[in-house]
Amino acid sequence: MRRENQSGMSEFLLLGLPIWPEKQGVFFALFLGMYLTTVLGNLLIILLIKLDSRLHTPMYFFLSHLAFTDVSFSSVTVPKMLINMHTQDKSIPYAGCVTQTYFFIFFGCTDNLLLAVMAYDRYVAICHPLQYTTIMREELCIFLLAGSWFLSCASALSHTILLAKLSFCADHTIPHFFCDLAALLKLSCSDTSLNEIFIFTVGGLVIILSFIGVLVSYGRIGTTILRFPSIKGIYKALSTCGSHLSVVFLFYGTIMVLYFFPSSRNSNDKDIIASVMYTVVTPMLNPFIYSLRNRDMKGAMGKLLGYVMFSVFGKANESYSCW
């Protein structure tokens, strides 16, 4: 295909998921259901944490922001993918593509950093329980949250500014369901060496440092448990960290398969499947993981359901009695 310079690119074409046209309707319904589950499930977590005073702790403070990030992260790509599947219009404006890339990187980095911050919170809770309230004070929690948002914004902004300076060629087809940064760099006629350096340094630094933070925190937790082994201590650690560990394995497991185990055949399909995992599947599963494996969340949910049931049926019985 011709690779002529086209600096005034007006739009790109997103090829979407590698599925047969006759199955578009089935996959549209599937991904719509998954997206609605993601939004409603994570908003429910935020609502429960907001309403239940027992959940006003650092752990659930970070969890509420993780839930918000998951909704935002999924909303960056999935609605556009669903619109393209439904209308068969695969175009996306240049400005919209760059904006989507920015927010995808921003919320992806925030997710990484919040998982590391939550791992540190669990480390303090298990290894220093008596000093927990002193260490994890409100000022530190806000500082860690603000730091995560600031670093994510700086990382996304640096990638986006460098992307906006590139010129693109006549081939403007993106073999993906969203404006993936790596796919966009392949379409550029400019020198992308600086962009690639930033991907491996800035982007890699966020992922690697976050993952190291998680490993160190849980390494210290494991050492503490093994130093004073007891059934009660192991049960407490699993009940405290089980939900977070499940999300960590799911999130970083997908990233490792994508970046550390490359395949020469069907590599593009593999990238798309991995992207679906951490943009659609993981945000959808997080509410189930945290609600089903967490006693406090189940208690708050039962309390909310009880209040709703009483409000509905209590008023109905009151009206019936008056009648």
Image (cartoon, rainbow, N blue to C red):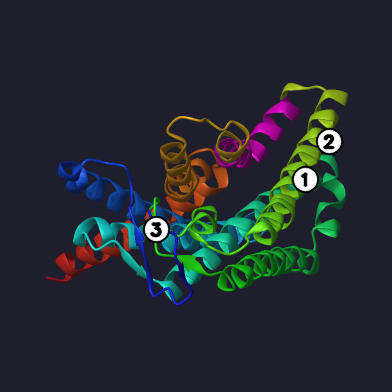
Tell me the residue that label 2 is attached to. 220
x and y, in percent, of residue 193 in the image: 67, 57
Indicate whether 59 appears above or below 65.
above
Residue 228 seen by the camera: no
Dot 3: element: loop
Q: Give whichever of 37, 276 is nearer the camera.
A: 276
Residue type highlighted by circle 3: Arg
Residue type highlighted by circle 2: Arg
> Which quarter of the figure has residue 90?
bottom left
x and y, in percent, of residue 251 in the image: 57, 42
Horizontal arrangement in the rendering, residue 101 relative to residue 59 (left or right): left
Tell me the residue that label 3 is attached to. 2
Q: CA distance from mark 3 to mark 2?
A: 56 Å
x and y, in percent, of residue 297 in the image: 52, 49
Horizontal arrangement in the rendering, residue 180 relative to residue 126 (left or right): left
Categorize mark 1 by other alpha carbons within 10 Å: few (<14), some (14-19), many (20+): some
Q: CA distance from mark 1 to mark 2?
A: 11 Å
Check if residue 252 falls in the magenta segment: yes
State if disc 2 and disc 3 touch (CB < 8 Å): no
Residue type highlighted by circle 1: Gly
Dominant SS of magenta comes to helix
